[in-house]
Image (tube, rainbow, N blue to C red):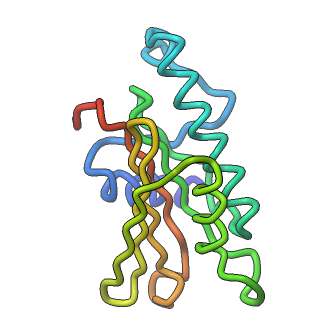
Amino acid sequence: MAAVASVTGALLALLAGCGTTPVSSGESTSKAASTTAIPAAKARDIEQELTAAFRSGGLSLLDEPTKDEQGCVIGYLLQPLSQHGPDPVDATVASLRGDGWGGERRTLLKGMRRVTLVKDGWTLRVRDYSAQRAKRGFVALLATKASCKSS
């Protein structure tokens, strides 16, 4: 599982363009403790929305969520629970729209479907690799906070 965690963190770091590390839900760091309560609470709210949306959409975690130390990036590597039924990416995006995510943009590039949504200074990128068997059919969710600077 450690190899998966490092691969997941590296993949999401590449997608985000900045350093991220896997963090379990109970783990904290001194840097995280030094941030103000309001931004940290907002990041937790965003994380809870994303988790509820992908679960209701029919996606499951491949590994722990990936976050950066400043609370600027939240990433998930997911896989569909079933190959039958409603499209889990569309269902996840619909759930997020219900939570106030908007500004939807969709693109298709070499079999990868990309959906971008925004809310409260956060940008969410959904990358669906399920049509690309070489990529093991995973889905990546990556939320980044606009006011943060890349490291």
Q: Quadrant of residue 55?
A: bottom right
Q: Is residue 115 depicted above or below 11 in this figure?
A: below
Q: Is residue 135 depicted above or below 35 in this figure?
A: below
Nearest to the observer: residue 67 or residue 126: 126
Can you say which quadrant of the picture contains the N terminus?
A: bottom right
Nearest to the observer: residue 72 or residue 117: 117
Can you say which quadrant of the picture contains the C terminus?
A: top left
Nearest to the observer: residue 51 or residue 135: 51
Q: Where does the image place residue 75, in percent across and percent down from the top left?
A: 49, 50
Nearest to the observer: residue 90 or residue 36: 90
Identify the residue at horizontal 41%, vertical 41% (top origin). Answer: 122
Q: Quadrant of residue 54?
A: bottom right
Identify the residue at horizontal 39%, vertical 74% (top origin). Answer: 106
Q: Is residue 109 left or right of residue 1?
A: left
Identify the residue at horizontal 31%, vertical 84% (top origin). Answer: 109
Q: Where does the image place residue 108, in percent across and percent down from the top left?
A: 35, 83
Q: Is residue 124 depicted above or below 106 in this figure?
A: above
Q: Where does the image place residue 49, in percent across and percent down from the top left?
A: 64, 45
